[in-house]
Image (spheres, grey):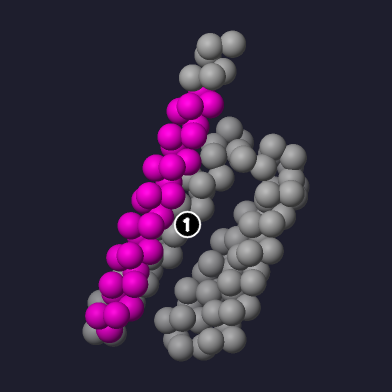
Amino acid sequence: MNNDQIEGIGQQVKGAVKRAFGKMVGDAKMAADGAAEQTSGEAEVAAAPNSGQVMGIDVDRIKGVAHQLGGAVKEGIGSLISDPDLRQSGIAEQNAGKVQNALGSARDTAREAVDKAK
């Protein structure tokens, strides 16, 4: 893992949190700024050498866990403030994160099988 990957992942996480918080409080500019920062981080990770993995872990696994975490926060806040739409949005984001994580896990398994076959 190199510094560009670390910085890119940091931007992705920061942007995702900012975007989610902006959506939760109804601040469209904050949500848009967060989405832009998240996209910038994704581009930075993608441009880095060996961008498909970070420390031997597929990037989609990391992103999937981040989505699951963000979704859990949304669901919790939605429950706390009795906002069923926000709660459902959080559940949907968690489920999307689980799918993304599973996709990354499958790629990791395939890579490991190829490496063993060599």
Residue at point 53%, 87% (across, down): 28
Residue 100 colored magenta? yes
Which residues are drawn in magenta?
A: 83-112
Query: In this rendering, is residue 6 above or below 12?
Result: above
Task: State the predominant SS element of the stretch in magenta.
Answer: helix
The secondary structure type at the circle numbered 1 is helix
Q: Position of residue 38 (x, y in %)?
A: 61, 65
Q: Where residue 112 sits in the image (x, y, percent)? A: 51, 23
- Badge 1 amino acid: Ala
How far across and how far down the image is residue 87, in percent?
Answer: 29, 74
Check the image and report above or below for 19 versus 105.
below
Furthest residue in direction top, as rendered: 118
Instruction: Examine the structure image and report whether residue 40 is included in the region drawn in magenta.
Output: no
Residue under the point 49% across and 32% down: 108
Residue on which disc 1 sits: 66
Indicate left or right for 40 with 114 as reference: right
Q: Which picture quadrant has residue 93? A: bottom left
